[in-house]
Amino acid sequence: MKAPVTPELQVLNRAGKNLFYSVASGVYYAIFRRDGKQIRRSLKTSDRKLAELRGKVERLTTDHAKPPPFAEWQVVMTNVLRIPLKNLDTEKWG
């Protein structure tokens, strides 16, 4: 009879605000709360800068999320999607 296999615990180290690094897999995760529930999303990268940008996008686009302030969307659009938003009036939208 085989000995039962003990699953290894996944250790996540804090790498920034809402950003965690898995020691076992070397992948970054975004962990945050929405409506009282903890949400953990794999960012599918081992590059920290890319993980920070993907974490912001994931946090802003998660289902059942409240609409973010316009300033946060402007950062995502310009930094991640490379869409310039120079001529928009922020007071009108946010």
Image (tube, helix red, strand yellow):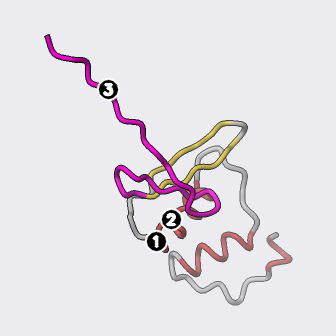
Q: In which quarter of the image is residue 4?
A: top left
Magenta-colored stretch includes residue 66: no
Q: Is residue 76 left or right of residue 86?
A: left
Q: Name the residue under label 3.
A: 6
Q: Residue 66, which numbered label?
A: none
Q: Residue 54, which numbered label?
A: 2
**Disc 2 vs disc 3: Cβ atoms closer than 8 Å?**
no
* Numbered disc 2: secondary structure: helix
Magenta-colored stretch includes residue 11: yes
Nearer to us: label 1 or label 3: 3
Which residue is farthest right? 91
Q: Where is residue 18 in the image (x, y as percent from the top left)?
A: 62, 56
Q: Which of 15 and 33 is in front in this view?
A: 15
* Numbered disc 3: secondary structure: loop
* Numbered disc 1: secondary structure: helix
**Disc 2 vs disc 1: Cβ atoms closer than 8 Å?**
yes
Q: Quadrant of residue 70?
A: bottom right
Q: Is residue 66 left or right of residue 59?
A: right
Q: Residue 50, which numbered label?
A: 1
Q: Which residue is drawn at 55% across and 62% down?
A: 15
Which residue is farthest left? 1
Q: What residue type is labelled 1?
A: Leu
Query: Which label's residue is closer to the chain start, 2 or 3?
Result: 3
Q: In this view, does 86 lie to the left or right of 12?
A: right
What range of the chain is rendered magenta? 1-27
